[in-house]
Amino acid sequence: MVNKFKRGLTAEEASLIASGLERFDSLRDAKRTLQSEEESVMSAEAELTNPYNDSGYASMSWGDVEAHNTDCQNLNEAEQVYEALLDEVLISCQWHDHLSGEVELYLTDIIPPPSNDTHLEVFQISRNAPDDEYSFYPIPRRTTITKVSLAKWFHNHIPDKANLFDPTESYKNLNTGYSVANIQVNKKLNTEAKTEGLKLSFSENITQTDAWQNLYKLSEKAFNDFPIWQATQAKPQNIQRDHIDRWLAETIKATKREAETVKKILVEIYNL
C-alpha cells in the first residue's frame, strides 16, 4: 500500500495514487494480482450471462466483475502516467543538478541546463553509487518528487487528479518546477539586487565584506595582544620589523599580506 502522507513520492507511487490503485505496493504487484484474478472473473462472467443458470449462482457479482475491469483500465492508465512521469523526473533531476551544483562536488563536469521545462520539483534524488559506471547519475524511478509539484503537473495533464496530491489547491497559485524563462527572471532579479547593493556608499559596502571583517578581527587581536608581547622584548620601543612579522604569523596567524597591513596599524598606534 502506498503511503500517501509522505512529503515526497516516486513516479510509481504517484501513478498508483492517481489511478486509484494505491492499495497495491507497486505496478508489478497490481498487475500480478489482477492477472491472477482474470480467470475467476471470466468464469463469473460466464455464470452471470448463462441463460441456463437456473440457480442464479455466480462466484462473483456484476459489481465485482465491473470493479475488476475498472482496475484493469486504471492499471493501463497508471503505466502510461508512470512512463510520462519518469521522463519528467529525469528532467527535474537535471535542472536540480545544474542549479545546485551539488553533483559537481563529486564530478569535474559542469552540468549544462536542460533544454526542456518541467513542473516537477525534486524532493530527494536517488543516485548511482560512486563506483558505478555512471557514478552519481540520478535514478528517476527511485527519486521522490514534492507533492505540490505533482499536483501542478497533473493539473496541466489530467486536471481531475491534481487535488489527490494537494487538496488545499495551493498549487494553483504556485509556479513549481524549472524552466529557462524562470531561471532567466531569477538571474535578472539577482543582478538587479547586486546593482542595488552597489548604490550603498563605499564605507557601507566595504565593512560588509568577509575580507574586511577578517582583517578587522586580526587587527583587533594584534592590538590587544601586542603590549604583552612588546614588554618581553629587549628593546620594546625599537623592535625589529621582521620580529613583528614573525609574531604576527606565529601568534596572530596572519598571512604575509595580512601581516604587512596589521604591522602598519601597530606601528602607527604604538609609535614604533
Image (spheres, rainbow, N blue to C red):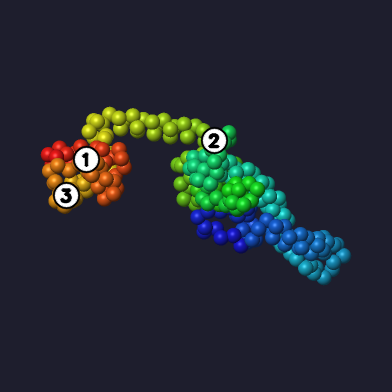
Residue 152 visible to an observer of this rendering? no
Image disc number at residue 233? 3
Q: Position of residue 22 (x, y in %)?
A: 61, 58
Q: Which residue sits at x=66%, y=51%?
A: 78
Tell me the amino acid under the disc marked 3: Gln
Q: Position of residue 153 (x, y in %)?
A: 56, 43
Image label count: 3
The reply, left or right, for residue 157 in relation to residue 269 is right
Instruction: Give the crowd class for mark 1: few <14, some 14-19, many >=20 residues within 10 Å.
Output: few
The quarter of the picture where residue 39 lies is bottom right
- Using the numbered discs, state the Cα–Cα distance from disc 3 to disc 2 in whole angstroms: 61 Å
Q: Which residue is mark 2?
A: 113
Which corner quadrant holds the N terminus?
A: bottom right
Residues marked 2 and 1 touching at CB (< 8 Å): no
Foreground residue among 74 and 192:
192
The reply, left or right, for residue 240 in relation to residue 132 is left
- Using the numbered discs, state the Cα–Cα distance from disc 2 to disc 1 in whole angstroms: 54 Å
Disc 3 element: loop
Residue 251 visible to an observer of this rendering? yes
Q: Which residue is mark 1?
A: 241
Tell me the amino acid under the disc marked 2: Pro
The tag earlier along the polypeptide, 3 or 2, is 2
In the image, residue 219 above or below residue 190: below
